[in-house]
Image: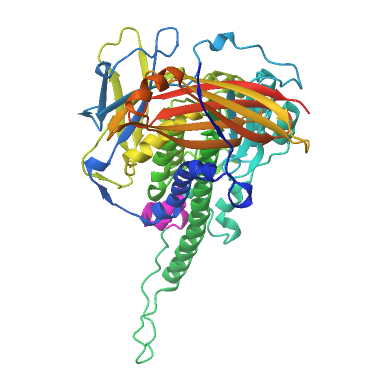
Amino acid sequence: MFATAIHSTPRRGPGGIDKISVMAYRSWQLGLMAGLSMVPLFAQQRTPTFQSSTTLVEVTAVVRNGQGKAIGDLTVEDFRLFDAGKRQTISSFRIEKLRRANESSRPAPAAAGTWAALPDRFIAFVLDDQNLVPEHFPNATLAAIHYLPELRPGDRAAVVTTSGHTILPFTGDRDKLREAFSHMVSLNRRATFDVSGLNSEISCKITYLKADWIVNGDPSSLQNCVAPAWKPPQVQLGPQRPGTGLTLAPPGEAHQIFLENQVRAFAESIVQAGDRDVQSYFLGLARLIGAMSHMPGERSIVLLSPGMYIPPRLRNLQDWTIRNALRAGVVLSGIDPRGVYIRNDPDDPSTMSDAWGLAETQERFGFMENVTSGTGGTFLRGDNDIQGAIRRIDSTPEFVYVLGFSPTQLKLDGKLHPLKVTLNRQRGLSVKARSGYYAVEKEPDETARRQQRMQDAFFSEHQVHDVAVELRVRSSHKPNTSIVLTAIAEIGLSNVPFRKDGPVNRSDLTMVVGIFDQNGNLVKDFWKDITLHPSDESLAALRRSGLELTTDFDVPPGRYFVRLLVRENEGQAMGTHSTSVEIRP
C-alpha cells in the first residue's frame, strides 16, 4: 500500500492555462516552430559546412521475412550502411516499435455511426491539391471515400491539403469525413504553366522545374521556349548619334532578346509561386506532425500525391521533415493517385516526354520515395486500384530500425547523397531503407534529447514498467454542478535510485498526467517536479510505502483516456500507465 500522499491541483496561469502545461508544451512547440522558421532560413542559405561532431544522419530500415512480416530481433551487427558507396560506422542504433504485434486481433470495422472505442490509431489523409490537376484529383477523393468503411472503432482520421488547410481535424465520424472529401478540389496550377497567353510566339509549357532551370541560367531550357533567331544578311546601319555610346542590334536579334526576357520574367514568377507551394507543403506537414506527436496511439500520414519538384535551396526541409517524423513516431506513406498515367498527357504538363518532363518525373518520384522510406513507410505508383493501394500501405510496420552515422565535412550542396543498407546475412530477409539525404541540422543537446524521449513515451500507446506506477481515476460533482476528474497516481520507489546529498538521500522525479478526448486530442495535462530527500532512517520506510499523488481536473461530461508517466531524472528510467473513464452528467 502506498502511504505517502500528495494532493495537487493544476496551477493556472494567465487566461486559465496551466503554468506547468505551458512549460511542458514549450519544448515541442519550439521544435515545431524551429521547423517552421527553417523555411525562409534554408531559402537564404547556400553551402554551409557542418562538422562531423555535430552531425547525425538517421537512416530508417524495415526488415521483412519471406511472408512480408516486419521483424524486430536484429542487432547493429546485422547491418551494413553505405553513404555514396562508402561503408560507414553505425554510431547509434535503436528499434522503434510502431504498432502492436496483435494487429490481426483488432475488432472488425464498426457499423456507421458507432465510434464508442477510445482512439488507438490516427490516420491523416493529405491530398495534394497543388500538384494534382483537376482531371486526376477525383481519383484521390473517391478512393479515400470508398476506403472509409474499412476504418475501425479505434481509428481517427483527418483530412488535410498540401496547400496547408486542415479540411477536417481528427474524428471518428465517417459521415463528416465523406463530406469533407466530397467538397475538395484541385487548385489547378497548370494554368500557370502556359506562357502562350502572355505571348503567342512562345508556345512551350514551363513547369516549376523548367522555370527553375531557366532562372538559374540553363541555356537549353531557354532555347526550348525561344529558338535562336534567324540571322538576316549583314546590312550597313546608318550612323549612330554622336555621344550615345550605343550600338543598335539587328531587328531580329532585338526581338530575340525581347522574347528571352519575357520567358525569364515568366519563369521567375513560376519559381516564386512554386517556392511558396513547396514551403506550404512542408509547413503543413510540420504542423500535422507536431499535432500528431502527442496523440496516444499509432500515427500515420497517407500522402495522396504524385510528388513534387524540390529545388536544391529547399531540400533541407525534406530531411528535416523525415527527422521530425521519426522523433514523433509518425510514418509517412504515399500513393500516386494518377494510377497508370500516359506520357504527354495534355491535362498534366509534368508528364511531357521531353528532357524536362522526364527530369521532373524523376524528381517527383525521388521525393516521394525518400520521404516515405525515410520514415518507415511505402510509396506506391502505377496502380489504378487506389483504394487497394490505401489498404496496402495502411498496415504500419511493427518494427523500424533507426541507424545513425556521422558524415565528415557535410556540405549543403544541393546534391543527393545516396544511402544503402544491407544485411550481413540475408537469411531469407529483405530490407527497405531510406534512399538518400541532402543535409542535416545540428543534433539537439542532451537536455533536449531527454525531454524528447519523455514526450515520446508520454504520447505513445505503449506501456513502460521500469518505474512501478499505477493510475486510478474517479469523478465527483462540485456544488456548482461542475465535474471533477481525480487522477490518483501511485508510484513505487523500491527500485528508484537515491543518491547521497549531505545528511539526506535525494531523488528527483517528474510526473505527467494527461487527459485525452475521444478523438485523441490532449484536453489537459499536469506536469510536476518531485524532489524526495529522506533521511537514512526514513528511506527504507519510504521505499516500502511509495507515493500517492492526487490531481484534480475540471472536465465536461464525456469519454476520456487518462495517461500517467513518471520519470526518474537521474537514470532516466520511466513508468507509464493508462486507463479510460466515462464522465456522466
| Residue 224 within the magenta-colored segment of the rendering | yes
In percent of width and height, residue 201 lies at 54, 60
Magenta residue check for 90: no
Q: Toward the viewer: 538 or 119?
A: 538
Q: Position of residue 422 (x, y in %)?
A: 29, 19
Tell me if 28 is positioned left or right of 408 in this view: right
The foreground one among 33 and 167 is 33
Residue 166 in sight from this viewpoint: yes
- The residue located at (41%, 22%) in the rendering is 542
Secondary structure mostly taken by the magenta-highlighted segment of the chain: helix
Rendering coords of residue 60 (x, y %): 37, 27
Task: Determine the image quadrant of residue 81.
Answer: top left
Position of 229 with respect to 133 (left or right) is left
Q: Nearer the viewer, residue 117 or 439?
A: 117
Residue shown at the point (55%, 56%) measured from the top left:
195
Look at the image and give the residue range highlighted in magenta. 209-227
Q: What's the residue at 60%, 31% (across, down)?
A: 515
- When the figure is inspected, residue 496 is found, relative to residue 15, above or below; the finding is above
Q: Is residue 136 visible?
A: no
The single residue placed furthest to the bottom in the displayed view is 242
Q: Is residue 175 left or right of residue 564?
A: right
Q: Residue at x 71, y 35 (%)?
A: 180
Q: Position of residue 328 (x, y in %)?
A: 46, 33
Q: Quadrant of the C terminus?
A: top right
